[in-house]
Image (spheres, rainbow, N blue to C red):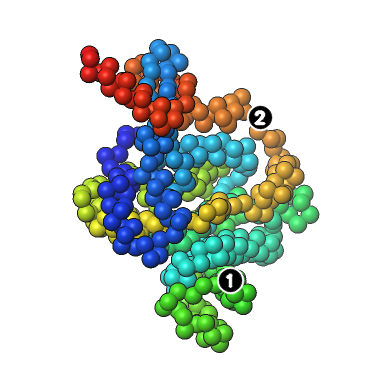
């Protein structure tokens, strides 16, 4: 993939100081760390390393990555490592894709209580899938799946939802049989929607009574218990959005799904079309009109404000596993699943995760196309000296 002409880092370096001054009232230390990391990513400010081509010996200097999970440039390496680890866990069945979305009425509360509400979104959606799947009239089986949190829509506005990638079936209650879902249908979305809504509302009520919810200024009227209970009842007036695609192909297809949904940030650099001194133009898909690609132009400050809406709390886990794929059950449950399906475990890969990720992440040699390998680490001071020496060499030539 070619390097994009514009980057989020360019916008931060250009307009970040002004943005921080305007919005300092709500920006946290975590926001500032993320902005600083992205602005410095792959620049001399983070140091670097000396690379040499394994084939022709060509030497070059590379700058270090920030490795921040919000950085659009630092996701490919982490994604490839993660996918390599997941490959051995795939089962030879179709996979369903289910999306649980919080309603707009909860957006302000979620922004003020990211850790509490996003945790609740994970817990309620997972419990809903497990409960409905266990019901004999729907599937009658124990599921195993992963959930990934996304907090954005195409225009960078706040839109919290989780993507669940689920094997289309599960283990029977006695753990001896694999129960297959119907080929064109997984679980009833109306049932999922009602149960998900009830679990989220119950979780909000519990958090309110526990004193762990902070109410934003426009919801201060809800500090009274009766007022909060009345507000919760309004959440039952509308159906909540739960979307389920029919089960797709087996393992050969699911890695493509995982790559699309697991390691993403609010916007990739490749969607940026134009960046001027005070405006940003980017592409977005209008799903209401056949996924038509359109352009949106925002002020640089508004673009950064929307980008910062999606900064997660420090240490918050945004990819989680449930059911028989939960870490505590996976080692024992996956062999049972394979036995029930009548398949043997996949052979051990001859390429380690580290080897695979290294091969993907190191760039090709500009001279011969071979693999560039790091041969020496350079501190910021050493890097400055090395660049100065190379500059003198270029001037003399």
Along the line of sight, which residue is nearer the eye, 317 or 27? 27
Report the quarter where the N terminus lies: top left
Would residue 214 be found to the left or right of residue 273 on screen?
Answer: right
Residue 388 to residue 276: above or below:
above
Would residue 23 be found to the left or right of residue 144 on screen?
Answer: left
Instruction: Return the x and y of residue 31 as percentages of the image width and height.
Output: 42, 55
> Residue visible at 47% across and 76% down?
238
Report the quarter where the C terminus lies: top left
> Residue visible at 54% across and 85% down?
224
**Which residue, given by chain and number where applicable, does mark 1 sit on?**
212
Along the line of sight, which residue is nearer the eye, 175 or 36? 36
Would you say residue 8 is visible in this rendering? yes
Instruction: Return the x and y of residue 261 as percentages of the image width and height.
Output: 47, 49
Q: Secondary structure at mark 1?
A: loop
Q: Number of labelled discs?
A: 2
Along the line of sight, which residue is nearer the eye, 351 or 354? 354
Residue 360 to residue 9: above or below:
above
Residue 278: image quadrant is: bottom left
């Amino acid at each position: 993939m070619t390097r994009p002409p514009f980057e989020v880092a360019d916008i931060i370096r250009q307009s970040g100081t002004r943005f921080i001054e305007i919005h300092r009232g709500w920006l946290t230390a975590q926001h500032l760390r993320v902005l600083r990391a992205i602005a410095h990513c792959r620049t001399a400010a983070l140091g670097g390393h000396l690379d040499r081509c394994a084939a022709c010996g060509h030497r070059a200097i590379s700058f270090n990555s920030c490795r921040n999970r919000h950085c659009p440039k630092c996701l490919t390496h982490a994604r490839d490592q993660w996918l390599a680890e997941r490959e051995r866990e795939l089962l030879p069945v179709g996979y369903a894709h289910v999306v649980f979305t919080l309603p707009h009425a909860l957006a302000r509360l979620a922004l003020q209580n990211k850790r509490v509400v996003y945790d609740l979104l994970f817990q309620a959606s997972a419990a809903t899938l497990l409960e409905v799947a266990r019901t004999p009239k729907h599937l009658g089986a124990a599921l195993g799946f992963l959930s990934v949190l996304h907090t954005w829509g195409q225009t960078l506005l706040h839109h919290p939802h989780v993507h669940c990638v689920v094997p289309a079936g599960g283990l029977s209650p006695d753990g001896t049989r694999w129960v297959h879902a119907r080929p064109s249908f997984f679980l009833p979305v109306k049932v999922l929607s009602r149960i998900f809504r009830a679990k989220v509302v119950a979780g909000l009520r519990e958090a309110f009574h526990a004193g762990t919810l902070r109410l934003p200024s426009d919801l201060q009227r809800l500090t009274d218990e009766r007022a909060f209970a009345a507000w919760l009842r309004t959440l039952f007036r509308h159906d909540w959005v739960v979307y389920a695609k029919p089960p797709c192909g087996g393992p050969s297809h699911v890695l493509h799904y995982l790559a699309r949904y697991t390691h993403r940030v609010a916007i990739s650099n490749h969607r940026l079309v134009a960046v001027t001194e005070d405006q940003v133009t980017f592409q977005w898909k209008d799903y209401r009109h056949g996924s038509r690609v359109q352009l949106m132009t925002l002020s640089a400050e508004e673009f950064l404000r929307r980008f910062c809406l999606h900064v997660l709390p420090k240490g918050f886990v945004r990819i989680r596993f449930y059911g028989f794929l939960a870490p505590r059950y996976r080692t024992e449950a996956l062999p049972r699943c394979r036995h029930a399906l009548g398949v043997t475990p996949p052979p051990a890969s001859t390429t380690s995760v580290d080897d695979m990720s290294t091969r993907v992440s190191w760039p090709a040699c500009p001279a011969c196309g071979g693999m560039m390998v790091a041969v020496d680490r350079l501190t910021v001071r050493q890097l400055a000296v090395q660049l100065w020496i190379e500059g003198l060499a270029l001037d003399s030539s």
